[in-house]
Structures are given as structure tokens and as C-alpha cells.
Amino acid sequence: MTTAPVKEATHDERAAGCGQDELLEIALGPHHPSTHGVFRMDVVLDGERVVKLKPVFGYLHRNHEKIAESASYLASMPYTDRLDYICSLTNNWAYALAVEKLAGLQVPERAEYIRVITAELTRLVNHTATIGFLTQEMGASGTPLMYAFREREKILDLFESLTGSRMMCNYMRFGGCRVELPAGWLEQTKKVVEEFPRFLDEYEQLLTGNEIFMARAQGVGILKKDLAIDAGVTGPMLRASGVNYDIRKVDKYGIYDRFDFKIPLGEHGDVYDRYMVRMLEMRESLKILHQALRDLPQGPLMDPKAKIRGFRPKPGEAYGRIEAPKGELGFYLISDGSPNPYRYRVRPPSLINLTVLEDMCRGYSIADTIVIFGTVDIVLGEVDR
Amino acid sequence: MSFAIIAVFTVAGALAAMTLRNLVHCVLALVVAFTGLAGLYLQLGAQFVGFAQILVYVGAVAILIVFAMLLTQSHEPLAHLTVAPGWVTSSLVAVAVFVILAWSIRSSAVGARSIQPRPEITVRNIGDSLMSQFVVPLEVTGLLLTAALVGAVTIAMREQRMNR
Amino acid sequence: MTTPVNYLLISALIFAIGLAGALVRRNAILVLIGIELMLNAANLNFITFWRYSPNPEALTGVMFALFSIGVAAAEAAVGLALIIAVYRHFNTTDLDQVDSMRG
Amino acid sequence: MTETMDQIFVLLKHRILAHSPVSVQPIFSAALSAIAILVVFATLFALTTILERKGLGRFQNRYGPNRVGPFGLLQPLADGLKSLTKEDIVPHSADGVVHMLAPIVLVVAAFLGYAVLPLGRNMTAINLDAGLLYFFAASSVVELAIFMAGWSSRNKYSLLGAMRAIAQMISYEVPLILSTITAVMAAGSLSTGAIVESQTGYSGIWPHWFVFTPWGFAGFVLFMIAGIAESNRSPFDLPEGESEIIAGYFVEYSGFKFALFFLGEYIGMFAICGLAITLFLGGWAAPFSFLTWAPSYFWFFAKLLVLIAMLIWVRATLPRLRMDQLMNFAWKFMLPMALINLFAASTWHFTPPGAIRWIVGTILIAVPYLLLGRGLMQSNKLEKRTYRFAD
Amino acid sequence: MDQKLRIELSKQGIVTTTLEELYNWGRKNSVWPMTFGLACCAIEMIATSMARYDLARFGAEVFRPSPRQADLIIVSGTVTKKMAPQVVRLYNQMAEPKYVIAMGACAISGGPFKQGYNVLKGIDRYIPVDVHIPGCPPRPEALIDAFMTLQKKIDQQTLTGEGRPRHLDPEAPSEFVVPRFGAHDLEPPNNPEVFRILNNIDSRNPGEVDAGGD
Amino acid sequence: MLGEGILKGLAETARNFFGSFVSKERLTTVQFPEERLPQPEAARNFPFLVYDGDDSQAGLRCVACQICEKECPPKCIFIQKSSDKKPDYIGKQQFYPAVFNIDVSVCMSCQICVEVCPFDAIEMDNAFELSTTDRFRGLLWSREQLAKPNSYFHNIHPATAAEVDERLAEAKARAEAKAKPTVAASTTSQPDSQTTTS
Amino acid sequence: MNPPVFGVYLPIVVLAIAAAGFAIAPLALARLWSKNFSPRKPGPQKNSTYECGLETKETSWIPFRPEYYLYAIVFLIFDVEAIFLLPFAVAFDGLGLGAAIAMMVFLLLLVEGLVWAWQKGVLTWV
Amino acid sequence: MLEEIKARLDAAVPGCRSEMILNGSPSGQHSLLLDSAHAVEAATFLRDHAELRFDYCSNVTGVDWLEAQHSPGYLEVVYHLYSMEKKRGPLVLRLRTENRTDKVHLPSLTPVWRSAEFQEREIFDLYGIIFDGHPDLRRILMWDEFEDHPMRKDYVEPDDYEYEPTAHDDILAKAKQHAMGKSQEP
Ligand code: SF4
Ligand code: SF4
Ligand code: SF4
């Protein structure tokens, strides 16, 4: 499982070297303070430079797909919460979307609005956590992370009062949403949304102009546009490399065409851009939230055709995808007419974004590797499933 | 009394530095010897030199040796007590040198000298004479240090880095 | 109690140890360590002679020791650099092996 | 009255010594000083760990330890007890003796510096003529201890951490020493006592601290930055940068040996802060002439606590530098600045007192600072960025 | 048994009582967890140490990355078969006394994923667990509760005698078999020394099991 | 630039530091065992069985239809249907669970059992202080442990409970209207009568 | 008054010994504790080196890059320089401009070395 | 739309026997079955064609069609392609193996779209399809010593059920079986 010392000169700097000093092999992970859980990288170092980096997966392979194939469609919904466990609501949505495509269900307008609201809140949760962890990996002793989690808690409170659980929301259903908004929820959400920009300002004050942060982030882990497209990178990472591709705009799924928002794009494709794109994306999310909260209509929550129990779509297949906070989250379902999906497949953005990890890290030091890895923003539950 | 303690430390350190198997242990023993020597300087009233000795030898030379060792010892952590073929002769030579030195010291007149009253040498004295009497040696030392820096760096640097 | 003889004897002893080490040990770094010890022994001599000289007010001995420390440091830097260069070339710091490889 | 308060510890020591036979008095005196230093600073260590944790908590919108004993003040005691009874693991491939010695050497080396720190008027364990040099000599042993720890563990991470620590410490030692030289020039002595003495005067109510001159201020800032790096504190805590190399050179240490590393680190940090106070902040001198009634040691420890609080504040705020940036900063910013500061200080002494010397001094420091800083930013291609938005 | 010895013993008994209290007080108030997260539960574990819940109040914010310096391993999340050997190895490398909290359904029993082929059905198959906290994920408050349960457990441990905890017993093992990767499964699938299974219970009538329920 | 950003950051943290002494917003800690945040209405952790009346076993609403057992995603419910029947709250003769076990060491708190139960017999509890040192005895909850009175339900989820009660009352009324002749219903407990608070 | 042993440096020696004692005493106490109550339990796994939870590979000797050494050289040179600079600084106020210039020259020589090293990229960590 | 692509493909890659597979669900995502001999060529065409520009391979999936459903059981790989440039998609491609035992080789499309790299490795790991031309075909999720392909429909899990407090369905059966095996042992 571990790679042997590389003998071939993979690195241009090495190529010039005299070739007698050996390369150092280090395994980062599976137990490593900053690999977001149980990820492992086998890194070959030349001094402190990364020459070769092989990600090793599977330490959290929980057989989600296999379990889903032996369970009913509904039973998989709570499992999707546990894929990308930071943003369960967008996972719910992606799965619901795929099933709705498969079964041809219509989602009522109110439910669509609620979906947008929860999904954008989820995006806020995810991005705050990501940049918080990112600073942690840069060695800040917890303060930015604490501030990020302070805001996250506020949104989690909203989730909890809506869905009953802080993280594992299990809220959406095929053809709608599970329960109505509780009393006072909208007001509370409006308040949180109003106050959120203040946190962003504070955070920028703390970090964006900080010389140490800039030195750590600018020019580090550059991802070129072409490579990003080729490797199927999606989400903020892709946009930080300058590609204008946001599924909310491209597919216009749900009701995203009703909102006025913009897509921030990076230019250099480095760590700093990936950080900034996330910061700016949060501000755009707030815009969407403002509009959605303003326009939320009354109406039913579920497609009357939808059934909770005994749900059996016609044989066929469907691929549904959404712009999850981490990138394109897709569900591919094959139905054979039985209550269980015949094939259930998750297209995990985290995993595929990792394809370019080696390309981004090569030539940078090991400390950079950790930071670059942080900006890929993965969640192991989704990578390994 | 204190002389005896320091002397024993110093000699033991020096001996260990030359006989231990493990190179790192050798360096650590060497540090003990250096520190002991510094102690001897202090005993002799040369405070500044004593502390300078620690600063330079323990703080810098030992570190330099350690770095050099780690750079060169990646494969053989333990230097086997490889001795030169003519180690018997070599040791005999050393012993002979010591005997001769000791004999000459014993027989010389130095031993008869009595200690002078403690001279009040302060750092200020050293600074004064450094900037007056010893200005030329100072500049020469500066030149030497620069030359050593350039030389050592050039030698130790990798070829390809020089080319860049 | 302490006379210059004691210091000089210690100095001679250290010198001899350094010499023996430099001659006997075959590891280049150890040889260098031996040489450093010898230099230090010389330094001790300087200081001793200064202290027991008729007029210790003249700082010659101390200054000598100081300069000697500087020179020794420079010597160590260059010497170790040489060892590293040799190691890079022959992949060993054992002087015998270096010898035989050169031949 | 204030006089006695000020000298109370000195008098106490004399009182105790008076009861002992003359032959052992020196030993007694030394032992008393040593024990006082050990006890005071070990207590300060315990106090600082809890204050730091609580302080960090406050910075982070939370309480920090507050349950063990009143206000959580017994927390260090519990930690100490726990460490004491924790199993001591020595990896079987490790070099047992060196592994064992390393923390001891570290603690000893860290404590040695205190011998020359004037903790109050007449409260220096030993007033050496070459005191400052002694301090640096003692603290250079710390590097060795760290190397011993990292090497003897035979662990990749610890060796890497140790090498990093040493490289970092030697790199910052040069600016550290150079920045002190300005103060030495002004005081005309290496003796810490004399340096403090030379700062005890007042003009009006304002003290004659070196920090209140352009070179002194620059020297102080440089010294503190280098000092933070010397004591491996954030943002220079790379050697133990847990996001990369787990815990640095003490990965393999458990139980009380690990606690000793902690102790050594904090003690080293206090020593550096103490030296900064001695050199630039007037040592035990009161900050205003009308405050001299408070005992001198009070001022020393008050200043020490302020500096420690600053370090905690910095730690709470800043992310960590990368190794190359760290080294670049040391050699390409700190060292030139220290040399320039040296130049500025000597110019100061050759210019007659008055406004002109302030202007010249300030310019001599500010211009190179701006140039070097700009150069550093540019060589790293750091810039403020603007972003594009697509519809 | 003669008189003297008995007096001696009782004296020692007194000594051990106070020592014991001190020892337990120190241990329970300074439990440093290891930086170790596995899955979703780890996020809640992190949230527990964050400002809102602040595990630091108990003196437990000193998350140590190295197992040598940690006292507590919070198995927070799904232990897969691929990860299990690493978890056991980490546990083995911790210094005594060491404690384990199994946080969340997955760590206790495999939880929602227990039907998975790569999921270990409970970490207590390989290492002894001190406190279980169910939930998926347990709320941060629940983790604090588990932490306090652990403190209570520590407080009740005796220093000597039969009832002393594992780490004080020279006979009890301090490291456990690390499973190997087999062709189809981990080998062995559990460590019988640790995992006291209730095999003889009629699974159709498990009511008997919880006779002593809490 | 040139240190300005660092100073700004320091100012920010300082603001938080001093803020923590004056404003609640900057000191967000809830000191858990003593202070607790109110749990929202919807909060859920593990299911419990609702019973009406005073007898925790006889009053169970569950009719052992085993739908929840079948739909539970991780399959952590185990039900054994009784061989005899007893009247439910409308008075209809129903089976009851002879064994009803939930393995909370597996339960993923997904609430699907609650959603699918046609009899509103199972609801989500929000108790979370459940840590135990014994996996097998502490975490397998039997019928006895699971049964909680309706008043408890009202206590933790007042709105939902009221809704459920209304629905049940309606169903009961309808059933009574339909089955006028049968008077046996009155013997069972009244579901809406103990909306007591505590 | 010169004390009999170690001259004026006695406080340093005593401090060193006391500090060593201060470090050793708890270690000894810990050893005593483990002997009496909490036995040490070494084992092949526990006492192998820690490597992110993976199985330990036999060697931990790692090759180092010469950068470390280069920095050490520069450091050494500047350390020695400091030795000469300190006495100069002490005597500074009594010295004339000539001495200051002499020192400047000395410093410039070293700075030259530094500049050379800088340009050669010695001070660049790769 | 799909017919058009098929026509272009057939014209551009001679001998490519692509086949439309219709999808019965309301999603209407029909797919194109390629023969494995020409798959790489066809994929490259789809990627590079100036009007099609399917430059982004989003999803790669393995499917196991057991004998029970499709008389000669086979394994299938499904690729979902999008175009980032033209903002179009999805185009669904399928590749089939000949059977599910020995002839399980398929050409790898990783050289065409790098995003397939990990996903193909995953399919190799979990389904046992061998991708010829893949740069680094190793197990990705399971450990290297593992021999089975667990996502196949006929995979049998190892028996490690000691005790199931909430016996249910097949788990109960397995646990029972295990308990019986255990109790016979001593
Ligand atoms: S118990 Fe639930 S929340 Fe915790 S790791 Fe398992 S699935 Fe995730
Ligand atoms: S909450 Fe979910 S997992 Fe728990 S018993 Fe109900 S259905 Fe099963
Ligand atoms: S709880 Fe509800 S669904 Fe479950 S068996 Fe009882 S009545 Fe049926």
C-alpha cells in the first residue's frame, strides 16, 4: 500500500540534483491532526518539497451504495445526510432531485423555496467550516475556527428547530419537504441572515489582509483552468480557477432562475482565490436568501402524487445533480420497479476534486500541502461513502 | 576542588568524544568537554572568553557538527569503532606527545610562577584594546570569516544550486 | 592550590586525546572533532599563560584566545563543508574508504 | 517603608544568611537565590498555563477551564498530578539515555538564564560583567537539548521537528543578539544590572527607557519577534506545527517528561521576556516617576505579565508561517533590520541631542523598513486582489 | 496474620485512600483527548470543543495529536475495517492510564452502517470501551455528559485491591491484538479477550438482556 | 500591507476578548450541565412509545403492525406481535407488542419510524444524557423503558402533541359515530384527558 | 570575598544543580509511583515509534538537505561576529569615530558575505 | 439530440457500433452504448469535436447486471458527460463487458477525461472490471489484500455477526446461524 521510494526524477528540481540523496517518504494520516478525519496521503519529499503524493482512500468506506441498494428509496434519505455530513440538506436535495426525475414528481413552489433557503444556509455552514478549518491548518490556534463555528451554531439552531437535528436533517422528501416551518422560524432566519455579513466583515478583518495569511495563501497550490476541467473539478475550486460553471446557473434546477445572484470567479487558482471565492460566494448566498425569504409563497409542501411508503418508481434510470457547496453532487439511480433501487450511485464532488491534489501539491512544501488539501474542502464521508 | 571537578569533566568529555561508538554521543561528549574548558577559562578569570567559548562552540560549532553528521550519516547511524590500521602507533605517538609535553611543563619555570593579583579585566577593557591595539587583527578576522563563509558555502552547496 | 602546571597538564592531556583521536579514528567528522579539541587545548594554554604572566593587564592572551575561537570556528565550517563535499562524492565519511576509492 | 518593601527579599535573605556559619554562606546565598528563582518561575509557569488557556478562551468567545478549583485555578495542579502518574513510554528503538537527558538538559538550560536577570533592585542572583553574553550562551544550550530530544526518539516527525527547531532558533539568534547590541551601546555594559541602572532616570515623569528612542523601539520589536521565534511560540511554532508534523520533537514523550518540555518552553519564554524588559523596558524601574513607591520586583513582574499577555494575544490571532517564509524573514528582514538598527543607534550617539536626532533616527529606521518590507512582499508576489463576477 | 502486619496494612490503607483520592482527582480533571476524528461524529466532537459548548471548561481542551500524551481516545464515528487496525494501534500506543469513549452509534455497534461489508460492528470488538454514548450523532451536550460519566467512573476506581482498574493491574494487558487485513475480512474478526459477547442469549427474546438495565 | 493586516487582526481579537466580558454575543458558551439551551419543538434523539392513561404497558398505542420495524433504515426495531388482542383507544380490538425493542446503539435518529407509524404510537424523545458504561444492557431498550406517557409527549413537543391528540380525537369521534352500537370503547383511557403539564 | 568553590560563579552552578534536581525529582517520583502502583507495561506495539497509526517502518533516518548546513554556517559566522561586536558596543561611548568606522568596516566585510550568500540563494529555503 | 450525436459519431469513428439505449423513466435520459474496441476513439471525438465539446466527464458508474435480469450477466460502466464550454448535458455513455466472470476487460477512458481516474479505480475495486490503459489501477476503497468485489450483486458478506440485540430480517438469520455455529464449537 505504501509506495517505494521513487527513483525516477519526477521533479524538475530533482532532475538537476545529483541523485544520491534519498527521498523521504512520509505518510500523513490516517490519523493526522489535519486530514479532516481519516484521509491519508503518502507523500514523497525531497527535503521539504513534495515530489509525489498519493492519496489513499477507503478509511471511511461505509458501503453507503451497497446498503442503499438493499433498502427502500426512503430509507436512503437519512443515509444521504451522512455523506457530506457538514451539509446534509443539500445532499437531501440532490437525492430528492434524482428520485423526482426518476419518478417524474413535481415539487410545489413553497417547498422549492424552502429548499433553496435551506440549501443556501447549508452553503453558509459549509463555507464557514471550510475556511475555519483552513486557518486551523495554517496554524492559527483555533480563534478563526471558533468564530466560524460560532456562526455555524446559529445556523445549526435554525436547522434544529426546523428539522429536529443539528446535522442529520433528513428533511426533504420525494416531491417536497417533510414538515412545515415552525412558528417564528422565518423571523429567526431573517435575523441570522441580517447579521451574517457582520461576521464576514470581521473574518475578513482578521484574515483577508493579514500578511501571514497572504504569504501562506497567495501563489500556493495553483490549479490551471484546463487541468481543472479535465479532472472534473467542480464547485468553488473550479470557479477559483476561473471557469464560470455553476450548476445553479447552468441547470437552473429548482427555482434558481428566479434569483438574482452572481458567480465570483478567481483568476490565479491558488489557495487565496479558493478562500476568497468561498467568502464571496457566501455573500452571494446571502443575497439569494434575502430574496427567497422575501418571496416565500404559501402553499402545500408535498406533491400529492408522492407516496412515503410503498414507493416504487417505474423501471428506468436518472441522473440528478445539484451545485452542492463542495461541487457537483449527483445521484444516479436505476430502478427495476422494485421498492429498492437497483443501482444507487453517488457522484461525490470531494472525491473527484481530489484527483488534482497531486498536481496542485507537487513542488510545494509539506506545510503547503496541508493548506492546499484544506482548500479542496473534502469530507471523508463523501469521498469514501 | 572546583578545578578538579571541572578538569575531570573536561577530560572525561574529551575522552568520551574520541572513543564512543555513536557519533551523536561523541558530539554530546564533545559539548561536555567544551563546557568544561569554558569552566576552566572562567576559573582563570577570563569571563568573556569563557562565555564566548560556550556561545560559539556549544551553540554553533556543535550544531554545525550535528548538521554535518545528519547530512552524511543517513545510512550508517552508528559509526563502527573503525580504527586506522596503524592505531597502535598512532596512540603511542599521542602518548609520547603527552609525556613530552608534561615533562616540559613540569620542568619549565612556569610552574614556579605565582598567581598575580586578580586583574580587573572587564568587557570594556577587551573592547578598548580590541578597537585600539587589535584593530588590524580584527579586520583580518573579519576578512577571514567572510572568506570562510564564502568558501564553506561554496564547498557545501550543491552543484546545481551554484549554477542557478 | 591550583598552579599553572595543572592547567597546562590538562591542556596537554586534551591535546593528546585530540591527537590520538584524530590519528586513530577513521571517521572524518571524528577527526575534525579531534582537531577541534587540539585547538581548544591551545586556547587553554593561551589563557593560562596570560593569567600567570607577569602582567595580566595586557590582554594579549585573552585576545589571542578570542581570535583563535573565531579562526577555529571558521576552520570547523570549512572542514565540515569539505567533509560534506567528500561524502557527496564518495558516499562515505570513512577516510580509509575515501582513500581506497580515490586510488 | 517603601525602601524596606522594595528590599524585603534581599533583607530576608541577609537575615537568613546571618544565622549560618560564614564558611557556607556563599553556598547558602546561592541556594536561596536558586530556590527562589525555581519556585517563583515554576509557579508562574503554572499560573501562565491556566491564564493562557483562560485567556485564549476569552479571545475565542468562551470561558476556558473554570471548573477545577476556584475559577479553574487548580487545573495546572491536576495536569501535573496526571502527568506524574502517567505511564512513561520510551520507544524501544530510542536512545534511552539521551531520551531521558533531553528534557532535563532543556529545563536546566532554560533556568540558567535567570541567574543574571535583575528581578528587582539588588535582586540578581549573580551580577556578571558579561551577563548578557552569559544569557545567550546559556540559551544556546537549549538547541542542543531539542536536538537530543528529536534525535533520540528515532521518529521521523520528531527528528524533522528538531531540525526545524534548531534551524529556526539559530536563524533568529543572530537578530536577537544584534538587536540587543543597541541597548548595550547605550548602557555601555554587558551587565544586566548596569543596563537596568542606566534606564532608571526620569525626565519629568517620563522614564529613560531605551524603548522610547527610535532605535530602542525598533530594537525592542525586533528582539520580541526574534524572542518569540526563539521560544517557539506562535506564529513561529513550526517545530511543533501540529498540522504538519504532529507534535514536533516531543512526539514520543509522554508523562512528566512531556510536561518538562512544556515547562522548559515556558521558562525559556519568560526568560526572553525578562531580558526584553531588562534591556528595553527599564527592568524593574517604575514606568512613571511618581510610581516609584511600588517595589521594584512588582514592576518587573507586572511588565513580565504584560508581555506574556501580549504573547498570548499574538498566539490567539495569527496563523503560522511556513518554514521557508520563516527563514526568509529571519535572514532577509530581521538580520538587515538589526544591522540597520545598529547603524541608526550609532548615528544617534554621534548626533547631538535634540529634534534632529529623532528625525534622523526615525528616518534611518523607517525607510529601510518600508523598502525591505515592500521588497519582501514583492518577492513573494503578495498583493491585494479584486475579483470578477459572472452572471 | 499477626497484629503488626494488620496495623501496617491499615496504615497503608489510610495512605492509599488519600493518595487514591488525589490520584483520581488529578486524573479526572485532566483528561486530554487525542486529536482523532473519524466521521460525522467528529464534527460534533469538534463542535463540543468550540465556543458554544466549550469542553475546555473541564480542562479537556488540550487535544494532543500524539497518542503518547493523550489520555482519552474518543472514537467518534464509523470505524471501518480498513481503519480498525490503525485505531487499535493508536490505542496501543497511548500511555496508561487511557480511556475510550465510543461516541455515536457507529462506534458502538456499527450503527446505521452495520450492514456494510467494510464496517466494524463496534470498536469494543478490539479495545475496551469505558463509556458509550448513543446518538447519531450525539449532541455536543451528550458528549459532555459522556465525559462526565467518564469522570465519575474514574472517581470510583480504587488504587489497590481486586477492584482496581485495568491499568493498575500488572497482569492485565495494556495493548491488544491488532487485526490484520485478510482476504475477505479482518483477522481475527474480534478479540475475545476484550469483546465479551452475549452469544448464548436467545435473540428472539432479548428482554432478558436488559434485566439489569440502567 | 507591511504589518497593517496583522495589526487589524490583533484589533479584531482584542475586540472579542474585551467583548467577552461585557456582551453575551461574544461569550457564547452555555455551561452545559447547569445551563441548558431550550430544545426546539422538533428536537429528536431516540424514539419512545406513547401510552395513554396510567398503565405504561396496557396503555401503549402501538398495535404491533410492524410497519416501523420494516421501514426503519438501520433495522434497529424489533417487535413481536402478541398472540391475544386488547382494545385500543377507540375500542377496536388490536394486537399489541409482546416485545418491542429498540437498539439505540444502532438507531440513527432519523424519525422515519415516527413518520410511517399510522397510529401515532411512536414519537421522538429529546433526552440525550444517555451515556452508559455498558453497551449491551444499557443501550437495548425494551418496551418498559420505551413507554412514556402522553403528558411527557406534550411536555417535549407541545405543538405536535396537540396536533396528534386532535387527530386521534377526530378519528375516535369518527369511529364512534360509525360504530354507535358498540359501547365497549368507553372502557379504555381517554387520550385527551391528561394534557397535564408539569 | 571569593567563595571557596567555583569562585563567583557559584550561584550559576547551584542554580544548574537545583534546576536539574527540579527536573529529576518529579521524574523520580513518577518512577516511584509506577513501581508501586501503576506498573509500566511496555509492549512491542506500544513502544514502537508512532507513525500516524500506521505500522512502523524500520528506519527513521531521514536524509537532510544541505540547506540546514548552509544556514548553520552563516549563523556560525555571525555568532563569531557578535563575539567581537559585544565588546565594541560596551566600549562604544568611550571610543571615537575612528573605532566606529573600523567596526563598520568589519561589519561591512561580513555584510558583504551575507549579500553574497543572499545572491547565491543560500538564504533561500527550497 | 442524441440521434444527432450518434449520427456524427458513427460518421466520424468508422466501425463504431454505437447503440441507443432507451430509458423508460420520466427523466428521459437515454444513453449510447459504445463497443469497447472503439470507445477511446469515440470518447476523444466527443470531447474534441468543436460543436459537441463534452469536455467534462462528471460521473462514472459501474452496474452489475446479474444473470437473473439479463440472460448473459454482464457488467456495465456508465459515463455521464457534460460540456462546460457549451453548458450542455448529460450525455450518457455505456460500455459493457462480455460476461461477469473472466471477460471483464474494458478500455479506460481516463486518458480522455482525468476525472474518471478515481472512479474507474473504484469500479475496479468494487465491481472487478479491469480497465485497460488506466494509469494506476489499484484498489482504492478496500485494502490491497482484499479479494472480493463487494458491490457485485452476488457478493456474500463475511460472517461476523456475534450478537444482534435487534435481530431483523436477514441480519437475524445470519446472527442466528452464527450463534448456532458458535455454540456447536465448544
Ligand atoms: S453515529 Fe451517525 S453521526 Fe456518528 S459517525 Fe455514525 S453515522 Fe455519523
Ligand atoms: S429513528 Fe430511525 S433508526 Fe431510529 S428507530 Fe426510528 S426509524 Fe429506526
Ligand atoms: S409503533 Fe406504530 S408502526 Fe410501529 S408497530 Fe407500533 S403501531 Fe406499528
Image (tube, coloured by chain):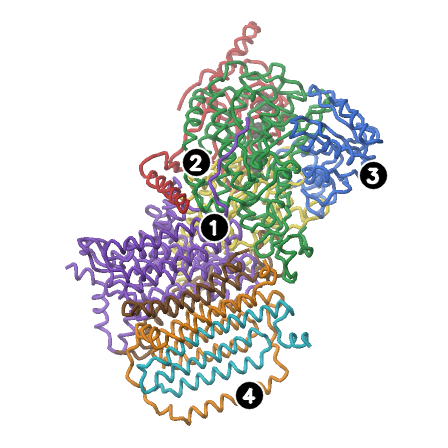
Chain colours: A green, B orange, C cyan, D purple, E yellow, F red, G brown, H blue
Q: Please name the amino acid that badge 4 sits on.
A: Val
Question: What label does residue A150 carry, if any?
Answer: 2
Residue matched to label 4: B93
Badge 4: few (under 14), some or many (20 or more) residues near its Cα, within 10 Å?
some
Q: Could you tell me which chain the residue with mark 1 belongs to?
A: D
Q: Please name the amino acid that badge 2 sits on.
A: Arg
Badge 3: few (under 14), some or many (20 or more) residues near its Cα, within 10 Å?
few
Say if mark 4 contacts mark 1, CB within 8 Å. Answer: no
Whether residue E163 can be seen here: no
- Give x and y (percent) for residue D62: 39, 40
- Give x and y (percent) for residue D305: 31, 53
Which SS class for mark 3? loop
Say if mark 2 contacts mark 3, CB within 8 Å. Answer: no
Say if mark 4 contacts mark 2, CB within 8 Å. Answer: no
Question: What label does residue D321 carry, if any?
Answer: 1
Q: Depth check: A322 or A91 in front?
A: A322
Say if mark 3 contacts mark 4, CB within 8 Å. Answer: no
Q: Residue at x 56, y 28 (%)?
A: A90
Q: Is residue D300 left or right of residue B26?
A: left
Q: Depth check: D299 or E69 in front?
A: D299
As displayed, is residue F112 above or below residue B91?
above
Which quadrant of the picture is home to ligand 3?
A: top right
As displayed, is residue D217 above or below residue C6?
above
- Residue mark closest to the camera, 1 vs 2: 1
Badge 2: few (under 14), some or many (20 or more) residues near its Cα, within 10 Å?
many
Q: Could you tell me which chain the residue with mark 4 belongs to?
A: B
